[in-house]
Every structure is written in structure tokens, then in C-alpha cells.
Image: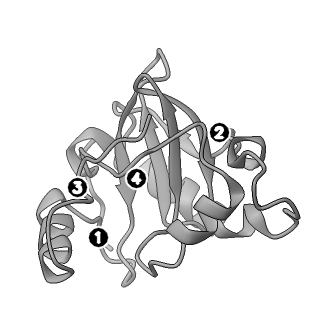
Amino acid sequence: MTRDPRTVAAAMVTAPWTHGCDLTVAGAREAFTDAHVHMLLLTDGGVLRGTLLRDDLAGATDPGGPALDLAPLAGRTVSPDSPVEEALALMREQGTRRLAVVDAGGHLRGLLCLKRTLDGFCSDADVRARALEHGGLHQIGQTGG
């Protein structure tokens, strides 16, 4: 991928799917049955409270337990004003393709999504097209928290 001079705000998906902080481990596992879902965003009043990856659920034994207890923020967020190249370096370092985009107050502003091909970032148009392929726009910008 060539050098990208944009900020994270210019490259992020602006209306990611979110879940409320009451999401259970079973609910998180169900959300991850969609192969396109890589990170769950747990919000409360627009504030990001936790991020969940599939691996975070590996040791969870109580399906009714709160997913939030397994959902860290450290190392999984980036500022919308950050250079996209810095975010990409962090993604490569951590071996991840998703970073939650939050402002200084912790409000979720978007999701930075590295494409499977690792040659660019997903756009709102990409997400809309995929949702239409799967029967509708119900997932775009849906919030549970």
C-alpha cells in the first residue's frame, strides 16, 4: 500500500454497527457468526465502553455473562485526527484489521477497517453494498447502546 496522507477520520466507516453494554457472551458469539464481523463495539449513550474480538471470548464459560467484562479499550482505539499511516502501523503491529475511532471524550466516531486484501480501508459505500447483498440496510448505523 502506498503512503496515505489522510487522517483516520477521512478513512473510517462513519456509522458502524454497535451493541449496548448489556450484550451477553452468548449474544457476542452470535454476532461473530457473521464472517464480516471482526470487532464488536459496546457503547452507552454514544460513548465507547468496550471492544470485543473473537479471541476475547475464548475463555468465557458463562453464556449469560456480560461481554463488557471481556472487552478492553487499550490498544484498540485511535483518534479521528491521527494520521492514517500511524493507525495502519498500529494495526500491523497488533495483527488486527479494526480500530475503533473515538474522540477525546470517548465518543465513538467510527471504525477504521482494513480490507481483507490489506491494500486499503473499507468505506461507507463498501458497507452499504455488502448490506444490500445480504438483504437490506438493517445493520448500517444500528445502535444498541
Task: Tell me the tag on residue 85.
Answer: 4
Q: Label 4, label 2: how many angstroms apart (C-alpha)?
A: 20 Å
Note whether residue 5 is visible. no
In the image, what residue type sits under mark 3? Ile
Discs 1, 3 touching: Cβ within 8 Å: no
Label count reads: 4
Task: Tell me the tag on residue 38.
Answer: none
First in residue order: circle 2 vs circle 3: 2
Q: Nearer the viewer, mark 2 or mark 3?
A: 3
Dividing the picture into quadrants, the one containing residue 108 is top left
In the image, what residue type sits under mark 1? Gly
Discs 4, 1 touching: Cβ within 8 Å: no
When the figure is inspected, residue 26 is found, relative to residue 72, above or below; the finding is below
Task: Tell me the tag on residue 140.
Answer: 3
User: What secondary structure is found at the residue carrying circle 2?
Assistant: loop
When the figure is inspected, residue 86 is found, relative to residue 81, above or below; the finding is below
Q: Is residue 67 left or right of residue 51?
A: right
Position of residue 43 measured from the top left corner of the image (x, y, whole percent): 49, 34
Q: Which residue is mark 2?
A: 73
Q: Is residue 109 left or right of residue 86?
A: left
Q: Which residue is mark 1?
A: 120
Q: Residue at x 32, y 77 (%)?
A: 119
Q: Label 2, label 3: how many angstroms apart (C-alpha)?
A: 22 Å
Position of residue 29 measured from the top left corner of the image (x, y, whole percent): 63, 69
First in residue order: circle 2 vs circle 1: 2
First in residue order: circle 4 vs circle 1: 4
